[in-house]
Amino acid sequence: MSVLYLPGGNIIRIKNKLTNLRAKIGVNHNVEYTVKDANGRTKKLFQPWSWVSSLIHHGFLSPYHPKISGIFGYWTAQVRIANTVVNTGIATMPALTGGTGTSYGAWKYIGVGTGTAASAATDTALGAEILDSGLVRGTSTNTAVTTDVANDTLQALLSFSVTGAKAVTESGLFNHIGTAAGTMLARQTFSAINVVNGDTLQVTWKIDFD
């Protein structure tokens, strides 16, 4: 209890209110996609409006929705979409930062799939990870890049050499090359990206620590 003395001898008693304060590191996360054909020419991809991405993200709209320019989005050379950092991924961050989790590897493996279920914090794997057509989970090239301050962002980049026709609708960032083990950091679903034999699909994950 605090006491405030006012002119004239009046006293106001003020009850202290304790506030629980905590430091918190924010994690911004997004993924970029580009596709080139067999001749190295960049193919146009459909970038949905943010509200369309949100509907897909929450499972209210199919990744196979009509790609009508001006209504659902627009055609561009690069697609950029936010994703969900899942619970299992969050749980590994303190261990990696403090060196207490010897079983956790680096986030340097990217997988893609054809699953359409909305991404959720409880996800531990992709809905339907692709295991053929040159789109098998692979090792990314990881670098530290700058978003706000020097080297505050992890960038993981992987180019898939496509050998078959697929409609890619999801991707994930993992700490293990095989699909039967390891932990997933993040997952997202998005408007279908159609690739065919000879294409190169480049996936770039960016995890920005604020």
Image (cartoon, rainbow, N blue to C red):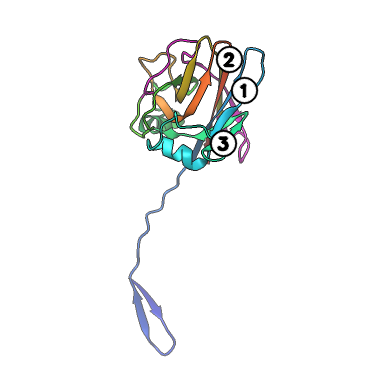
Residue 157 vs residue 22: left or right? right
- Viewer-proximal residue, 165 or 172? 165
Region of the chain picked out in magenta, as a range: 125-154
Residue 44 in view in this figure: yes
Mark 3 to mark 2 CA distance (whole Å):
23 Å
Residue 172 picture location, percent across and down: 45, 25
Amino acid type at mark 3: Ser
Tag 3 near tag 1, CB within 8 Å: no
Tag 3 near tag 2, CB within 8 Å: no
Residue 181 vs residue 80: left or right? left
On the image, numbered disc 2 is attached to which residue? 199
On the image, numbered disc 3 is attached to which residue? 69
Verify whether residue 152 appears in magenta.
yes
Amino acid type at mark 1: Lys
Q: Secondary structure at mark 3?
A: loop
Mark 3 to mark 1 CA distance (whole Å):
16 Å
> Which sits earlier in the primary sequence, circle 2 or circle 1?
1
Tag 2 near tag 1, CB within 8 Å: yes
> Which sits earlier in the primary sequence, circle 3 or circle 2?
3
> Which sits earlier in the primary sequence, circle 3 or circle 1?
1
Where on the picture, by quarter, is residue 7? bottom left
On the image, numbered disc 1 is attached to which residue? 43
Where on the picture, by quarter, is residue 182? top left
User: For mark 3, does the 10 Å Cα neighbourhood hold few (<14), some (14 to 19), or many (20 or more) residues?
Assistant: few
- At 51% across and 41% down in the image, what residue appears? 50
